[in-house]
Image: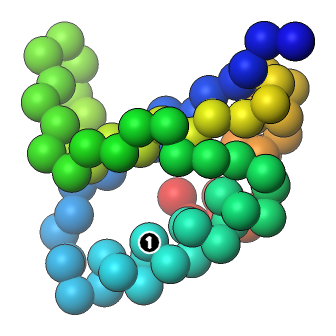
Amino acid sequence: MAKGYLKVTTTVTNPGVFSEYVQGFAFWIQSIGGAIFVKDMYSKTVEVKSGKFTLIIEFRSKAIALEAYKRAEYQELS
């Protein structure tokens, strides 16, 4: 079965609160069986507008990645 990935981008505007956000996000990733595949704090986007922080989360399948995206916990974090 093909793995699935979820790409998350954001721009950190308040570094003081960002560590709390990261803790909540890390808990969510663990709770759904995901793993951080790529983390880049200073992304450079060349084709579309995007945030400076990029995170790619790997899941066992595309269906699980989509399910994870739809979960209320993720929607509250994003």
Mark 1, residues whose alpha carbon is within 10 Å: few (<14), some, or many (≥20)? few
Vertical comparison of 4 with 50: above or below: above
Residue 71 location (% of width, % of height): 80, 54
Q: Quadrant of residue 27?
A: bottom right
- Front residue of this view, candidates 45 and 39: 39
For this view, does 31 lie left or right of residue 45? right
Taking the spot 50% from the left edge, 78% from the top edge, the residue there is 23
Tag 1: residue type?
Val
- Helix or strand or loop: what does disc 1 sit on? helix
Taking the spot 44% from the left edge, 76% from the top edge, the residue there is 21
Vertical comparison of 41 with 7: above or below: below
Residue 53 location (% of width, % of height): 26, 48
- Front residue of this view, candidates 65 and 38: 38
Q: Quadrant of residue 32?
A: bottom right
Q: Which residue is mark 1?
A: 22
Q: How is the image coloured?
A: rainbow
**Whether residue 9 can be seen here:** no
Quadrant location of the N terminus in the rendered image: top right
For this view, does 5 lie left or right of residue 45? right
- Front residue of this view, candidates 6 and 48: 6
Residue 49 location (% of width, % of height): 21, 28
Taking the spot 70% from the left edge, 24% from the top edge, the residue there is 4
Taking the spot 81% from the left edge, 24% from the top edge, the residue there is 61
**Whether residue 21 can be seen here:** yes
Vertical comparison of 4 with 74: above or below: above
For this view, does 66 lie left or right of residue 63? left
Residue 9 location (% of width, % of height): 36, 43
